């Protein structure tokens, strides 16, 4: 398979710099090309996985790199993702990686924290929105209402505000309230309250039970769902991979990953490398978030919280 250059789209608003597409199959490259064409950007080249890293190194300029992955590409995939992550961190270009959920953990371990957008099992709208943001530098967010649904955009715009609110609440709980509540005395700041595992499990079960009677998206609260899941795992002394945490968030994986990144940036979540597998990472509560969650349950006492 040879790389090829395409002509600029007549309706492109993204300047001369093209988008370079890398994929692990002909179908992957074609799917990536359709996404680039959907936003009116210019395709610089499409290259197979085995030659992508070298081709990107030779690229004089690019507005973005789109990587399309269907399966675990082993060392070739790792090399490409490492290179893309480093290039993005250095500001050489922006990048989007589109992957199947089956390889989420492997991909996340290579690109997390480097500013690379990750789309998992994405719809056409999600894929186009991710690339539009990457190629526009984020200044055309309002224009994305024609690409992604208004509901999804509105939810994503609330992401930073909602996580900031949660971070503030957890920070408050970790040092205790200004005055003790009459219903339950405040737990001393130096103590680590013990939370029964059953209490957390019952709340998680109750939250999922609502989906039997109402639409799930009526109650979408991925930040809280992930906090509960990580607290439950901490109590049970279990490690949580990224893919499992995304399932616990009860929202599409791409949305869950945005929440995960923001919660990590806020210092609420911590990424830990798997000591037995260098291609995987786990997620856990930060020390402050763990203490805050435990204090929260201690102060709530027997009150039912869903």
Image: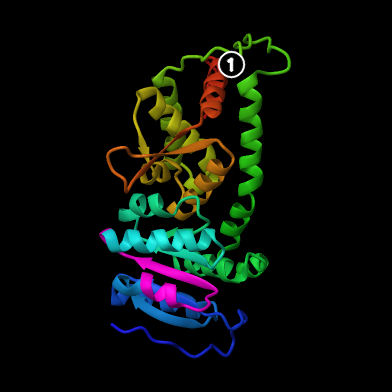
Instruction: Identify the residue at horizontal 52%, vertical 47% (top origin).
Output: 261
The residue under the point 54% across, 29% down is 289
Figure check: 14 above or below 305: below
Judging depth in this view, the residue of 13 and 274 nearest the camera is 274
Does 114 sit above or below residue 173? below
Of the pair 189 and 205, the residue shown nearer to us: 189
Horizontally, is 39 left or right of 137 in the view? Answer: left
Residue 97 picture location, percent across and down: 43, 63
Give residue 151's position: percent from left, percent from top: 59, 57
* Residue at screen point 37% across, 55% down: 107
Q: Is 134 positioned to the left or the right of 23 in the image?
A: right
Of the 4 image quadrants, the one containing the N terminus is bottom left
Residue 84 sits in quarter:
bottom left
Tell me the crowding category of disc 1: few under 14, some 14 to 19, or many 20 or more residues within 10 angstroms, Cα based. Answer: many
Residue 184: horizontal and vertical position, in percent? 62, 10
Q: Where is mark 1, residue-wise? A: 299
Q: Which residues are magenta?
A: 53-74
């Amino acid at each position: 398979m040879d790389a090829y250059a395409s002509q600029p789209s007549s309706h492109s608003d993204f300047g001369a710099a093209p988008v370079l597409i890398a994929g692990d199959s002909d179908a992957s490259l074609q799917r990536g090309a359709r996404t680039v064409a959907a936003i009116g950007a210019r395709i610089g080249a499409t290259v197979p996985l085995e030659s992508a890293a070298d081709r990107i190194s030779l690229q004089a300029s690019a507005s973005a790199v789109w990587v399309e992955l269907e399966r675990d590409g082993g060392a070739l995939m790792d090399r490409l993702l490492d290179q893309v992550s480093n290039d993005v961190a250095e500001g050489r270009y922006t990048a989007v990686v589109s992957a199947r959920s089956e390889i989420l953990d492997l991909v996340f371990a290579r690109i997390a924290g480097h500013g690379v957008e990750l789309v998992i099992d994405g719809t056409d709208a999600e894929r186009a929105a991710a690339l539009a943001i990457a190629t526009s530098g984020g200044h055309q967010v309002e224009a994305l209402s024609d690409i992604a649904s208004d509901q999804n955009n509105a939810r994503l715009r609330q992401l930073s505000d909602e996580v900031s609110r949660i971070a503030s609440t957890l920070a408050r709980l970790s040092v205790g309230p200004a005055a003790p509540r009459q219903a339950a005395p405040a737990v001393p700041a130096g103590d680590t309250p013990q939370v029964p595992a059953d209490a957390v499990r019952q709340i998680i079960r109750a939250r999922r039970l609502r989906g039997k009677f109402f639409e799930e998206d009526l109650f979408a609260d991925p930040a809280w769902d992930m906090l509960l899941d990580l607290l439950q795992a901490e109590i049970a002394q279990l490690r949580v991979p990224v893919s499992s945490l995304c399932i616990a968030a009860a929202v599409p994986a791409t949305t869950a990953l945005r929440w995960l990144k923001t919660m990590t940036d806020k210092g609420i979540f911590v990424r830990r490398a798997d000591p037995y597998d260098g291609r995987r990472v786990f997620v856990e509560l930060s020390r402050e978030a763990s203490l805050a969650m435990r204090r929260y349950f201690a102060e709530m006492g027997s009150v039912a919280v869903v």
